[in-house]
Image (spheres, rainbow, N blue to C red):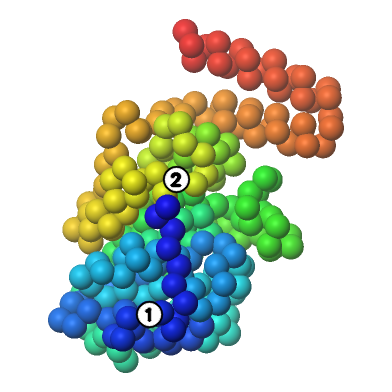
Amino acid sequence: AWLYRVAMEQTANRDIPISEYCLLRPEPGSREVLLVFSEVNTPPGRFTGYKVFGGAGRNVIFLNCESDWFIHGVPGIGSDLDSTIEGLRGVMAEHLGQVDKLVTYGGSMGGYGALLYGALLGADRAVACGAETVLNIPFGHSRAHLKGEQFFLRPILENASCAFDLYYGEFCFFDMVCAMHVMDVAGVSITTVANRDHAVPGYLHDRYGLGRMVDAAFKGELFVLSPEDTGGYLAHPGLIRLVMALRVAAEKGRQGPFKAVEAQLLKGLARVGD
C-alpha cells in the first residue's frame, strides 16, 4: 500500500517536530516546499505519505488534524484556521527562509486541506485526490466527523491565485458531485479516473507514482493520466445528479421518488449508450 505513517520517534534525525500534528523535513539548499495533508483518522504523531514524500529532494511539511478536515486549523500551529495559516508562514520563515515554490498535496480529508490551505497560503499549485468540495454532502466521509458543519470551497477557490489539480474516482458518485461543484472555476483542472472509487491515491501511486505527480506540479504542469485511465463521466452531469438523487431517495425509503429517479436514470443511460 502507498499509505505510510511514521511515529515521531521513528523519524529521521534531520526531521523537526513542530507539534504532534506538524512535522518538518528540511532539505538544505532547497527553496521548494511541499505541504502534505494527512487522511482521516491518522493518530497524533503520525503522518500520511511520510515515506512517499520524505525523500522528495525538497522541503516537506507533514500536517495532521483532529479529523475535522483542517477547517479548525492544525493543533500546535494555530488555534483556528486563520492563526494556523499565519503559523505555517511563520514556520516556513523561521526554519526555511526564502520559499520560491509552494505546492500542497492530500487525499480525501487531506485533499480538502490541500485545496483550502493552498488557496489561503497562495501556493503555486494544489494537488488533491477525492476532495469533498462541499463538506457534509450526503454519503460523504466528512458527515461522520463534522456534526452538521458545512463549508463550501468554491468561493475560496474562485478568489485564489493558486492552480488546482483535482483527481476523482468515477465510481464514487458523491465525489463526482463535488467535482461538478467546482469544475467551471477558473484555475481548476479536474481529471476523473475510470473504474475507480474514492480511494484513488493508492492506484495513482502504484500506476504513476505520487512523487511524479507532485514533481509536475512544481514544474507548473498538470499531470496527465493515460487515455485508458481517464474517465468521461463529467460530460454527463445530469446523470450524476440523478444517481445522487436516487441514492438519497433510497436512503430515506421513499419508494415513489426512488422509482421515478430510477426511470430517468435508465433513460439517460440508454441515451449515453446510443
Foreground residue, 45 or 200?
Answer: 45
Provide residue 81's location: percent of width, then percent of height: 54, 76
Mark 2 or 1, which is nearer the eye?
Answer: 1
Quarter holding residue 85: bottom left
Dot 1, how many residues are within 10 Å of its Cα: few (below 14), some (14-19), or many (20+)?
some
Tell me the SS state at disc 2: helix
Residue 121 visible to an observer of this rendering:
no
Residue 184 lies left or right of residue 251; in this view the side is left
Q: Three-letter amino acid code at disc 1?
A: Thr
Query: What residue is pinned by disc 1?
Result: 11
Provide residue 29's location: percent of width, then percent of height: 15, 81
15 lies above or below 200: below
Whether the residues at callouts 2 and 1 have beta carbons within 8 Å, the answer is no
Quarter holding residue 232: top left
Q: Earlier in the sequence, mark 2 or mark 1?
A: 1
121 lies above or below 198: below
Provide residue 252's location: percent of width, then percent of height: 82, 37
**Residue at screen point 68% across, 62% down:** 145
Tell me the SS state at disc 1: loop
In this view, which residue lies farthest toward the left? 29
Residue 71 lies left or right of residue 4; in this view the side is right
**Residue at screen point 18% across, 77% down:** 30
72 lies above or below 114: below
Query: What residue is pinned by disc 2?
Result: 200
Residue 72 visible to an observer of this rendering:
yes
Disc ID at residue 37: none
**Residue at screen point 83% across, 22% down:** 256
Residue 258 lies left or right of residue 15; in this view the side is right
How many angstroms separate mark 2 from mark 1 (CA)? 26 Å
Foreground residue, 95 or 159?
Answer: 95
